[in-house]
Image: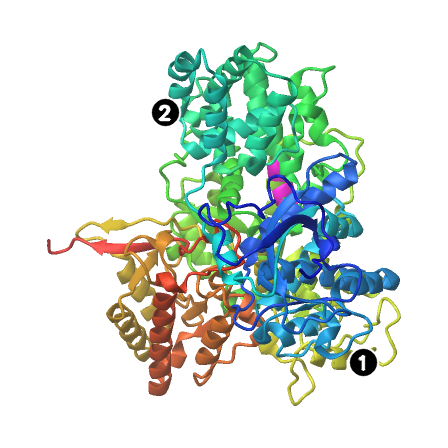
Amino acid sequence: MPTAPDSKEPSRHEDWSGPDVIGGKRPRGTIMQAKETLFADLVQGRAQQFQVPLYQRTYSWTEKHLKQLWCDILEQAQLLESGEKASTHFLGSVVLAPSPQNEVTFPRWLVVDGQQRLTTLALALAAIRDHVADAEPDEAERIDEEYLINKRKSGNDHLRLLPTQADRAQFAAHIRGPLTDQAAGGGLATTYGFFRKKLVEAADPAAPQDVFRIEQAITSRLTLVAVTAERADNVHRIFESLNNTGLKLSQADLLRNYLFMRLEKRGEHVYEAYWLPLQDSLSNDELEQLMWLQLVLDGDDRVRRQDLYAAQQKRFEDTKTDEAEIEAYIRELHRRGAHFRRLLHPGEEPDPEVRAALRRLEAWQAAVTYPALMLLLDRRERGELDSSETARAMAYIESFLVRRMICRVPTNNLNRIFQAVPGQLPLDMPVAEGLHRLLSSENRFWPDDVELRGKIRTAPFYQYGRWQQRKLVLQRLEESYEHPEPVDFATAQLTVEHVMPQSPGDEWLCALSNEAADDETPEDLHARFQHTLGNLTLTAVNSELSNHPFERKQDLLRGSHLEMNRRIASTERWGVREILARANELADRAIALWPAPLRGVGRAERSRDWQLAHQVLAALPHGTWTSYSDLAAFLGSGAQAVGNHLANTPGVAHAYRVLTSEGRVSDGFRWAAPQDSGSDDVRARLAADGVRFTTTGAADPAQRLSADDLAALLAGTDDDQTDSDDTAQVVTESRGEETRSDRFFRQLTADDSAETVAAVRALFAHWEELGGWIGHGAGRVTTSAYLMLGEAGSPGRGIWPLTFYPGTGRGGTAEVVFQYLAAREPFTDRALRSELLSRLNALDGVDIPEGKLELRPNIRLSVLEKDRNRELFAETLTWFRDRWEAGQRPEAAPTDGRLQDARLPCGAPGAVRSVSVRGQ
């Protein structure tokens, strides 16, 4: 048998060389060895190559897989940092067989299964190499030679991992260069870009991570089972055995079975008295979460939910737990189950102050705070604090979340912060005071009053956090006025409204021109202040307010029952001065509403702002650029400050892709660090990155990313990042009501030509003939229309390629939701999204750059007035339907290398099926 790559001795759990391999039988003629190994042991050392067979499918991991892997990597890196001796993370199996091209001096292995894992880890290491290349070139070279290349080989043999032919050129470009336009797209490029962006985030001062600890976590903390077979072995049967999985027991199921196996004498009594009531009061997933919370509350602040069973079993066996102690554990679980239900259902909490606090945290979707909340309810039951003190402690938690959200502090370390609360809460002071002190401590980054006021004045509040969180902030600010007849927010259909509209007409821009500085356009001023908190309010009449001049909005806001709207209406005009004045007023109220951290803790506010800039620049797609004013508007800063920072900060990825608003290199631009010989020509670097130039020498404006585009880049593809205030539901409209469809076409007709409206109606009819349905936004904002596929009225089970919006002053648009399609099968395949882009670009007047394939670009609906454009658009919709249906067939399901449970959300945010009952 040929020698396998270096690995550890077989684990007693993973030694599959025994007789029970496939359904209790080993495939005839198959002798295989399975050994636990590390990535470093597998690929390091002598020159060798891992070849992905040509018959394997192409690389297909999506952002969901990458996010889970990154969480696992960071957790292992943190364990390394702390010096704790903890178990490694099992990543999966790699099935290897000798390649027909195998040589004694240069071993080659066929990767029968596990190519997705190996390719992803290689790209992660390539991203680390490039991340440190400028500052530590020797370390970059070491990573290259240890894991990625065979230094003394050439051609394909130079690569330590050789992907399937379809992926080979793109993979090679990321490992050894050069990165061409062709190599810059596709799933491999997306994965490489994901890790580059995450490495920039990992340098965040709020939770800094050592990049070499991350490297060590990847290479020596992620375990694999390397399964090797002889040349004549039936590798396909081996692969089949490894992927033949049935219905898996949950962690709660496993732990329950273990507990009652140990309760030989009192099992029936314990089951009837404690377990059955607990099981009836919680779903299986909630019960598993409660079991995990109990471990955290008992001091195991590093345990993950997926390791719950093993961790709890180990605790019982290490302490030689007897039957009485098992019963006590279940009894305690039952007691804490009542606390957990109050987090899930705040209405069950009897105290009104605590109930209100829990409802606000529920609306915030603050499940991350459960360890701290469970601790507070437990301490209250034990008599260590009363309900008033409990509510005060919960107010500190709410303030911690709200202030961080307003000040745009990243949320990636919140899990660690709140899991650590039970073990770190000071014991020498009352519980509420101890929690206040703990959350105020160094590296928690709870913004103080000065930072909070500054961000309320300048930060684009509308672009950060979930829409429910933005709405809750405005709701709390409105409640602070203590109106004698307060609004019932539970029933009022309120949404967030921009007073100065997002798409300003000429009257708005003319007014702004009087306030703009000499080096600033009205459009720049609008971009800086449109999304700030001082320009936002709540209203139920968004569609009526629309983009009207302020005088018209005043009339509508005067009739509002909200005090904040009446105050806006009482001003004579609305511009930057008024926005800043209102921001100051709201800041006073926010400071009073949400308690500040304790003084005396050093902070790094400005560096955190620039960290956000570094993150978004690292995420710029190939073939795109942005301007100083766009980046400043995204940050809530000034263009001059942005320019100064980039000019004086070495190592900022893509800093040269920040240009003037006209698309030109700034006269004051300079490299922050010496460049390699011949690389100081900015235009050449831009061209190499896919940026096109017009005949005047300016960068192509179609490739420019606005402040909103930059915000979308960091939002990811998750549904909870949508800005929509709509809710997904089936709506039955009463006789005589204006349907959502009627409203959509009324608004479209008000701003577009009759030809455009007729073309949109025809396309909607064509979509329904294809088996699709039209959903409409359920909010009171300017309505929208989704082209849905899937079960009618159930957007959570379907998919949509486009969202149509009325014009509100500038003509209707169709938003192409590439960003969301990237997380929806079968369009996780970038080639399919690229084909959709090419088909749309075939329309006369449409030119969406390749770089916006990760975003949500718009098409003017007026292009549909041309007959040929309508034909092409209809053909594109038919093609989309056909691709989606093909992806739903069982035979289209992936069969290798996927993470388990790879279901992805695919519902259109806010899509509803409008059902009219007229004439019934």
Residue at the disc numbered 2: 280
Q: Which residue position is annotated with label 1?
A: 681
Question: Mark 2 Cα within 10 Å, few/some/many (few <14, many 20+)?
Answer: few
Residue in view at x 73 percent, y 59 percent:
43
As shown in the figure, which amino acid type bears the numbered disc 1?
Asp
* Magenta span: chief secondary structure: helix
Asked whether 11 or 325 is in front, the reply is: 11
Q: Give the range drawn in magenta.
A: 401-407
Q: Which of marks 1 and 2 is nearer the N terminus?
A: 2
The Cα–Cα distance between marks 1 and 2, rounded to whole angstroms, is 68 Å
The part of the image, by quadrant, that contains residue 913 is bottom left
Magenta-drawn stretch contains 583: no
* Residue 319 higher or lower than 147, as above or below: above
Closer-to-camera residue (793/919): 793
Question: In this view of the protein, can residue 450 be seen by the observer?
Answer: yes
Q: Pick out the residue farthest to the front.
A: 29
Task: Using the image as rendered, state which of residue 53 and residue 98 is in the foreground.
Answer: 98
Q: Residue 329: percent from the left, percent from the top?
A: 53, 17
Q: Nearer the viewer's eye, disc 1 or disc 2?
A: 2
Up/down of 914 relative to 8, above or below? below
Label 1, secondary structure: give it: loop
Q: How many marks?
A: 2
Where does the image place residue 801, in percent across and percent down from the top left?
41, 66
Q: What residue type is labelled 2?
A: Asp
Which residue is at a point 28% across and 76% down the rendered structure image? 758
Label annotation for residue 68: none
* Residue in the foreground of this view, choosing between 276 and 863: 276
Q: Is residue 261 left or right of residue 676?
A: left
